[in-house]
Image: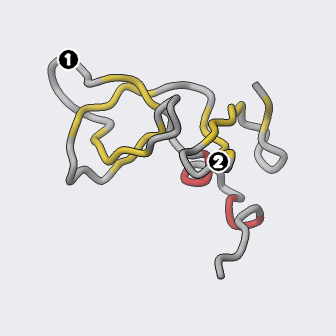
């Protein structure tokens, strides 16, 4: 585990399917399958899935939220897209 250089939050790094590393919040969250959900999580496999972080009944699994979506200083660390 490491810590965000901007906000100090604990993060872990997950290798995405593209091979790039993504910082995610260290605490895994329960998620419910919802292809049209407003949330998304990163699985340990590097797959990103659309879901809901609130639901009823048994959760579909546990995933990680991208730290870019929770860090108050995320824009300082985003790389430009071409």
Residue 21: percent from left, percent from top: 68, 45
Asked whether, in this view, residue 24 is left or right of residue 35, the answer is: right
- Vertical placement of 11 versus 81: above or below? above
Q: Which mark is residue 58?
A: 1
Q: What's the mark number on residue 3?
A: none
Left or right, 68 with respect to 37, comes to: right
Residue in the picture at 21% in, 48% down: 35
Is residue 79 positioned above or below 33 on the image?
Answer: below
**Farthest residue toward the top?**
58
Q: What element carries label 1?
A: loop
Q: Position of residue 26 (x, y in %)?
A: 62, 28
Q: Position of residue 15 (x, y in %)?
A: 63, 39
Q: Quadrant of the N terminus?
A: top right
Front residue of this view, candidates 72 and 39:
39
Q: Please tell me which residue is depicted at 35% across the width and 48% down the height of the picture.
A: 39
Residue found at the very far bottom of the displayed protein:
82
Q: Nearer the viewer, residue 77 or 19?
A: 19
Q: How dense is the environment of label 2, judged by Cα within 10 Å: few (below 14), some, or many (20 and up)?
A: few
- Residue at 52 percent of width and 29 percent of height: 44
Image spot of residue 3 (x, y percent)? 79, 35
Element type at marker 2?
Answer: loop
* Residue on which the image places disc 2: 19
Which residue of the protein is positioned furthest toward the right in this rendering? 5
Question: Mark 1 or mark 2, which has the lower sequence index?
Answer: 2
Residue 24 picture quarter: top right
Whether residue 29 sits left or right of residue 27 in the image: it is left
Q: How far apart are marks 1 and 2 (CA)?
A: 32 Å
Asked which colour scheme the image uses, the reply is: secondary structure
């Amino acid at each position: 585990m490491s810590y965000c250089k901007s906000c100090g939050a604990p993060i872990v790094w997950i290798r995405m399917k593209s091979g790039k590393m993504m910082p995610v919040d260290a605490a895994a969250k329960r998620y419910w399958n919802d292809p049209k959900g407003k949330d998304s999580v990163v699985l340990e496999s590097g797959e990103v899935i659309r879901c809901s972080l609130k639901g009823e009944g048994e959760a579909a699994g546990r995933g990680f939220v991208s730290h870019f979506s929770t860090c108050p200083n995320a824009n300082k660390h985003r790389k430009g897209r071409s």
